[in-house]
Image: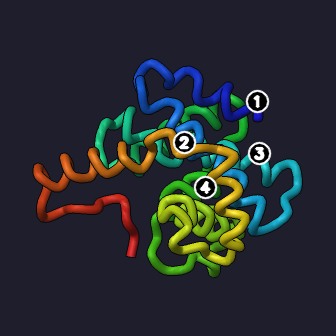
Amino acid sequence: MERVDEILQPFATIMGKDYHAYRNHVYRLIRLCNELAEFNEEEHEKIQIAACFHDIGIWTGPSLDYLPPSENQAIRYLTKINKESWIPEITQMITMHHAVRSCAGNQYKLVDLFRRADIADFSLGLFPMGIPRSRITQIKKDIPNAGFHFMLLKRALAWFIKNPLNPAPMFKW
């Protein structure tokens, strides 16, 4: 997926050793989205863009309260490529990707599909979100974790120590 590498490459330096772990997460997320539905070319492009930016604020923020910085990076990119009309949908995909409850009623159908795919990967398949476990297992085999979840755990623990009253700012209830 050429677009993914094009988008993520400029962040490689700031991400450092986490780059490949995040890149693999993005690739798994896109594959998991494809397990949930078939998409036209425009929808597939939106998924790729949202996937690249959905957690990027972890590094550009840098913070575990990374949704606003992630949205800002996506907005900059969409403006740069003259796709401003996509901003509301893609920022919703980013904002709601950790929503605990379904977003199926959202005006944009990709929002809930994206949320479900991210939960399936974030939970290591514990919550398959309608994706066959065999497909999740195969995708994890094809695209290794590369330390993504360990990195998240370390950052979450560091955040919790400093912010015990706001332990998970990225989750939406």
**Label 4, on which residue?**
88
Sooner in the amino-acid sequence: mark 3 or mark 1: 1
The mark found on residue 104 in the picture is none
Residue under pointer 1: 2
Q: Of callouts 1 and 2, which one flags the residue occurring earlier in the amino acid sequence?
A: 1
Q: Amino acid at mark 4?
A: Pro
Gap between marks 3 and 1, in whole Å? Answer: 11 Å
Q: Residue 45, which numbered label?
A: 3
Please, what is the three-letter code of the amino acid marked with disc 3? Glu
Residue linked to disc 2:
53
Q: Residues under labels 1 and 2: Cα distance? A: 15 Å
Q: Quadrant of the C terminus?
A: bottom left
How crowded is the residue under tag 3: few (<14 C-alpha within 10 Å), some, or many (20+)? Answer: some
SS at mark 2 in the image: helix
Dot 4 or dot 1: first in sequence order is 1
Horizontal and vertical percent position of residue 77: 60, 33
Q: Residue at x 84, y 59 (%)?
A: 39
Q: Is residue 86 visible?
A: no
Q: Amino acid at mark 2?
A: Phe
Q: CA distance from mark 4 to mark 1?
A: 24 Å
Callout 1 crowding tier (Cα within 10 Å): few <14, some 14–19, many ≥20: few
